[in-house]
Image (cartoon, helix red, strand yellow):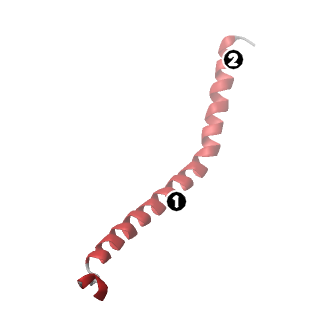
Amino acid sequence: MDAATAVDLCRETLMSAVIIAAPILLVGMAAGLLVGLMQALTQVQDQTCLLYTSPSPRDRG
């Protein structure tokens, strides 16, 4: 086996690994993006809800 054949074999092996792993990685990235987006949206909503709450009677003084 000469060097060119070994390089071609390595290139084909790496491309096969990328083709096999790509769908799994894409699904994981999409799920992570969706979860991160939902966490960011609900965190903003929680912070704005705190602005509209009335103080308790013992805080008035």
Disc 2 to disc 1: CB gap under 8 Å: no
The image shows residue 61, relative to residue 33, as above or below, that is below
x, y percentage for residue 38? Answer: 43, 66
Q: Amino acid at mark 2?
A: Thr
Q: Which residue is mark 1?
A: 31
Q: Amino acid at mark 1?
A: Ala
The answer to which of 37 and 14 lies nearer the viewer is: 37
**What is the secondary structure assignment of the residue under circle 1?**
helix
Left or right: 30 in relation to 22:
left
Residue drawn 54% across the image and 51% down it: 26
Residue drawn 52% across the image and 59% down it: 31
Q: Which residue is mark 2?
A: 5
x, y percentage for residue 61? Answer: 24, 84
N-terminal of the pair, mark 2 or mark 1, is 2
- Which residue sits furthest bottom? 57
Crowding around mark 2 (Cα neighbors within 10 Å: few <14, some 14 to 19, many 20+) is: few
**Whether residue 11 can be seen here:** yes
Crowding around mark 1 (Cα neighbors within 10 Å: few <14, some 14 to 19, many 20+) is: few
Give the quadrant of residue 53. bottom left
Q: CA distance from mark 2 to mark 1?
A: 39 Å
Residue drawn 75% across the image and 13% down it: 1
Residue drawn 65% across the image and 38% down it: 17
**Whether residue 56 can be seen here:** no
